[in-house]
Image: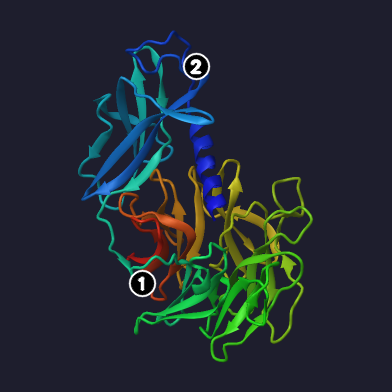
Amino acid sequence: MKTEGCMKCCTGIFFIAGWILLFSACSRSSENPLDGLASGVATPVLQAQREGEGIRLSWNWARFDLPEIQQVNPLAFEVLYSASETQAPQVIASLRADENTYLFAHPEPGKNYFFTVRGIAGAFTPSQSRTVMIQAGSTPEIIAILPSDNLPRTWPAWSPDGAKIAYQAPLPSQTSSGTSFVGIYSFNLNTGVESLLSPGKAPYWSPDGKFLAFSGTEINSGAIIQGPEHIKILDLTSASVRNISQGDSSDHFPVWSPNGQWIAFLSKRTANANVEIWKTPVGTNVVYIPTRVVSAGPAGFSGKAVTNIPSERPAWGPETNELTYSRQDEYLNHIFRITESGGNETALFPSMWNDYQPAYSADRQKLAFISDRSGNAAIWIYDLANQSFRQVTDISVIQPELTGLAWSPDGTKILFSAKDTSGVAKLVTVTVD
């Protein structure tokens, strides 16, 4: 996951750089920190957050002279606002160089606002930030749901009855050894009891709540064997575990279809070594040969596999035979959907930002996802009925980890992982209704 985070960070830097105009070459002057920038690229890096009923913008002037990033300062800033992605931005404020925050007061609650900032320095060409999107309104309540300790917990999943959550965390014998073995845990929200269920990763509940699908290596005489990870099913009644995939390739991030008949997962089973979406039926004591989900791709490219999938869960819905996922498209990750039998993939919605980690509510009417549209990672909700967006978290309060979102069965909360002040991943919920 750390590698994936770095990839998203680099993606964001190159995308920002693509918005920038190079400054005219001139002699370096001690009075003007923008002098001599012809060899590099400079841009204001903008972030937005809700503050009460207002919106506060903050930024820093960064010079991207790869591989190093240096900080410089313009002589003045202009703040620009537009009511939509397509509307031309209008200047709403001009600020001195020592002012790097701006409060946009009294916006309309629930409405989307689009902001950019550009630096002004005499005759130099203004350099404009990447556009950010934010909504007015207060921040929903965020609650930690597990004891405060140093055990990192990630990839949560909520049981269909709402009584338990499952997640992965280091095995007790591995917390001090530095190895990467993790286990599947459950936490009873009513009793507050945490239980270790099995070695494995990224659990996902069956629709009836009787089983957990997860990925893991083989176990022999109680010892975990290094090797390919396969998709497994844990019977919560008998505590027995069985494989539903096998082979030399590792399989990850299983997700159960709403009808309980299929499990989709990620794997590099083909010779091209790309991460692709695969599916397999859920039979009794049978290991089926998985089927690859393919896309017709762009015009003129038939049989193109759905590739470049980040290391994250796909999602079933809103139709039973449909899979939703994020993948890289040009320089950004966008959210797509495709039928589980293949065909043409389509973008779920257009976007000029990084969008990833899709997760449907139980009724399949809303999609939660992580996006950097407010300047850094935050949780947003897309309403499929009215095609509207709603911001749930603010970057000033908490930032979600790239380790999965999970809805409560009643659709009122989203469970996710976020780091605390000491850098340990915790499981928290945020109220969305």
Residue located at (48% from left, 44% from top): 353
Q: Is mark 1 on a helix, strand or loop?
A: loop
Residue 271: which quarter of the image?
bottom right
Picture coordinates of residue 411, whole percent (x, y): 39, 71
Question: Is residue 41 visible to the viewer in this orientation of the structure?
Answer: yes
Q: Is mark 2 on a helix, strand or loop?
A: helix
Above or below, comparing residue 27 to residue 300 in the picture: above
**Mark whose residue sits in front, 2 or 1:** 1
What's the mark number on residue 180? none
As shown in the figure, which amino acid type bears the numbered disc 2? Ala
Q: In this view, does 225 lie to the left or right of 373?
A: right
Front one among 243 and 128: 243
Residue 1: which quarter of the image?
bottom right
Picture coordinates of residue 8, whole percent (x, y): 53, 46
Mark 2, other Cα within 10 Å: few <14 / some 14–19 / many ≥20: few
Picture coordinates of residue 146, whole percent (x, y): 36, 72
Residue 248: which quarter of the image?
bottom right
As shown in the figure, which amino acid type bears the numbered disc 1? Leu
Q: Residue furthest right?
A: 271
Above or below, comparing residue 44 to residue 249 in the picture: above
Question: Is residue 112 visible to the viewer in this orientation of the structure?
Answer: no
Q: Which residue was labeled with disc 2?
A: 38
Q: Residue furthest top?
A: 27
Above or below, comparing residue 23 to residue 275 in the picture: above
Q: Mark 2 vs mark 1: which is more N-terminal? A: 2
Picture coordinates of residue 96, whole percent (x, y): 25, 24
Q: Which residue lies furthest to the front in this view?
A: 177
Front one among 376 and 28: 28
Mark 1, other Cα within 10 Å: few <14 / some 14–19 / many ≥20: some
Q: Which residue was labeled with disc 1?
A: 146
Residue located at (31% from left, 49% from top): 396
